[in-house]
Image (cartoon, coloured by chain):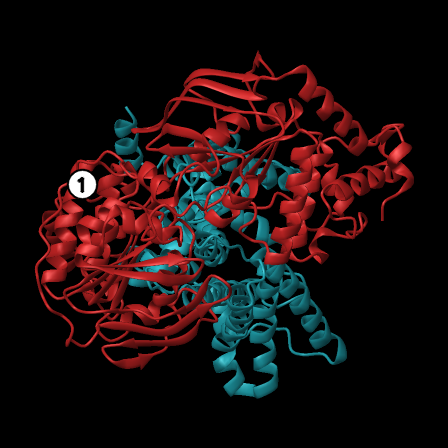
Chain colours: A cyan, B red
Amino acid sequence: MSELVMQLRRHTNPAVLTASGCIVALLIAGSFYSANFLSPNYLLQQLQVASFLGIIATGAMIVILLGHIDLSVPWVVTLGGMMATAAAGWWGDLGAALAIPFGVACGALVGLINGIGTAYLRVPSMIFTLGMNAVVQGLVVVHTGGFAPQDRATEAMHDLATERTFFGLPNALLLWAVLSAAMIFLLTRTTLGRKIYAIGNREKAAYLSGINTRAVTLICFVISGAMSALAGVLLAGYATKAYQAMGDAYLLPAIAAVVLGGTNILGGKGTYAGTIVGTILITLLSSILSVMQIEEMGRQIIYGAVIIVMLLTYGRGAKTQG
Amino acid sequence: MMRAGALAPVSFGSCSAILGARFMQAVSGPVLETIGVSKRFGGVQALSNVDFACRSGRIHALLGENGAGKSTLIKIIAGVVQRDAGRMLLGGEEVVFATPREASAAGIGCIFQELSLMPHLSVADNICITDPPRRWGFIDGRAQRHIAADALARAGAEDINPSAPVSSLPLSRRQMVEIAKSLARDPKLLILDEATSALTAADVTRVFKVLKRLREEGLAIIYISHRMSEIAELADDCSVFRNGQHVATFPAGTKSNTEVVEMMIGREYSHAFPPKPKRDLRGVQPALETRGLSWESALRDVSIAVRPGEILGLGGLDGQGQMEMLLALFGALSGVGGETLVEGRPVTLASPQSAKACGIGIALIPEDRKTDGLMLPMSVRDNLTFAALDSISTAGIVSSRAENAAVADMVKLLGIRMGAADDAVGTLSGGNQQKVVIAKWLLNKPGIILLNDPTRGIDVATKQELYQLLRRLADEGAAIILYSTDYYELIGCCDRVAVFYDGQIVRLLEGDQITERALIASALNISTADQGDVLLGEASL
């Protein structure tokens, strides 16, 4: 009997199926409200918006798979946007050319510090990244307070976030697709991916297998920081300017997307396909709720409730079987 | 520190002395008696049909080698595990303890080696933790301190301040608090399971004085220790356990050490071992050598050498430093002192990663495959190739073809029985899981293989396969260090056995010297050569 269950578990991922089912159900329910919900234009627009969240969720997922969490997302997103726009202001044309990599690098640097704190100083990631979030917030405020840096997005940022250069598909969506492909490859085909899952399942066993668990943890936090900052760059491009607290709305949805996609919140289990589906579901949910004119606070309640329900359903269990 | 609490209504110290004395007069029968108690864990009969009794005013020592059933009996008495069959009488009345709390309420106090104190609470909080005195629903701090002070006085530790946090006390003082905590509950029966192993000699002396006084007060005491000298000093009665059975009970001092060791020997045995080749390895350079290895208090000046083609056993009772020895050699401990040489060259083993890559390669088959060896929810394939990922990948990308080939090879080599390589490794039987742990290291072709009790909890057929495998690996030139809690395995498998006692190697047995008697005697750090020396129970004569 239990063998049968294991077989079923292996071949179907209930969380991905459920989340996909929810997406279809949302679209159908939405189409009764307004036929626009099924129009290609609306769907592409939703995917474009989803790609910002999707990129953040990519970073969040890799850290969650390790059994850690990155709570510095909000202000790393803001930092990414702010630094990219500021670079263009500081260094003129050169700065404009380097704006995107510079913003991403700043996020990666915060990720590096998170990684050092978690892997080497052994501070619980929940505390350390929360602390870093506050530190980054303070630094950003100092940065904008003393003098007025440029906050207008560069041409490249704007194009990346809003244009449709190829086949009428949004550039942001294509970027998310490329990153997703890279992430799937990383998680399924590389030694690093194998190590991430192993550490999430049983760090001690991974360590005793001669794996440099600290280095792997460090790399994952760097990726997470870079992803958040990249999303910040895109968001600044999308809104044409970077502004304070622009990342505040993204922490909870990012974690919700990862958990909705069936990734175990304690680490070690989850597929990237799930995170994609989870991201789309969260974005649609948010869009439909706002079309239905449910206010921000209502959305927050629904997000929170959805995360808790999904945790109760899928997010636990597998790990406790050991 | 003895407060005026002697007259207060909560004065447990004086109460229990009276109670104890009354108890002795009223009941001349045993305080606690078990009749036909049995317990089975999975396929292992841990206790079979045990009749045992202990009396008030006596210290009763339990003897037996690892897995003889002492601890299981204690756990049943203390309500930690439930018996499968048999009866238990406390003061002549049948009792069933579903939880340790019930046992404790009935007057059974237990002190284990692992402390049960909360380090950040005060001594008094800890002593009264299960049932603090209350006043209007709140904990009565003053009454609590009185109770604690009385209990500490009774435990011979008047100098401990009841208001001090436990974390401010050194380890041996904490053990005194632990004893006081048990006494505050006014037990009829006090059980000490290896409770002195963490204490300094001076504290052991104090504990002994207390135990002797408690005996005068009429307490029944069950005492488990692997230190024969302690048993000799304290015990009134001794019971020997072997293979889950109660072999004999006798007044202390009536049997010689040799006789006791004989009684402890004789576990049923049906393992078949491959023949040991006769080889003289004396001139061969050791694959792995340590000089004066030390780590905290667990390893003290350990020097061993193991040569290619040889299986070196680590013997002795549980927890004498063997595990730390293997972890130190694998780079998993920090702050190890002394020198380690691989193929004659000094090496620094800072992490398992460096041990794996060092010279001819070191592998460790850890003690607990479920927590240390495997990622249970991950597939057999992922687990099997995990330690050797570099060998099946290029530029960090795993080659499926190389991986599948490696898995197929190992499955065939070790005869791993499984459904598909995609199955979670947790679905395999214990024996097959252990084969996966071993296979994962063999993929690295290590020259030095360390094994920490690899046959624990696996079936006999798989055990025999493992013995064959170890000998084959040795014949192919691996140097193997095998720690086993099963003496027969050491006798059957090993070319030499280093017996550990208290973090040191007390004896190195070779060839025909490796016998049950020699292993057990060295494990207890006694000599059986002097026939008839009566060591047990000198104190009670």
Which corner quadrant of the image does residue B200 belong to?
A: bottom right
Count of picture labels: 1
Residue B461, above or below A196:
above
Q: Position of residue B493 (x, y in %)?
A: 18, 52
Q: Position of residue A51 (x, y in %)?
A: 46, 55
Q: Is residue A136 left or right of residue B538?
A: right
Task: Give the residue displayed 56% in from the left and 48% down from the top.
Answer: B196
Question: In the rendered image, is residue A295 in sight?
Answer: no
Q: Mark 1: few, some, or many residues within 10 Å (few <14, many ≥20)?
A: some
Between residues B384 and B455, which one lies in front from this camera angle?
B455
Q: Is residue A66 left or right of residue B459?
A: right
Question: In the rendered image, is residue A262 in sight?
Answer: yes
Which corner quadrant of the image does residue A5 belong to?
A: top left
Q: Position of residue B273 (x, y in %)?
A: 13, 46
Under tag 1, what secondary structure?
A: helix
Between residues B355 and B116, which one lies in front from this camera angle?
B116
Q: Is residue A72 left or right of residue B375?
A: right
Residue A269, above or below B283:
above
Residue A79, above or below B483:
below
> On what subunit does the disc labeled 1 rest?
B
Q: Position of residue A243 (x, y in %)?
A: 66, 66
Q: Which quarter shows the C terminus of chain B? A: top right
Between residues B41 and A82, which one lies in front from this camera angle?
B41
Question: Which amino acid, by three-letter code, is at mark 1?
Answer: Thr
- Residue on which disc 1 sits: B462
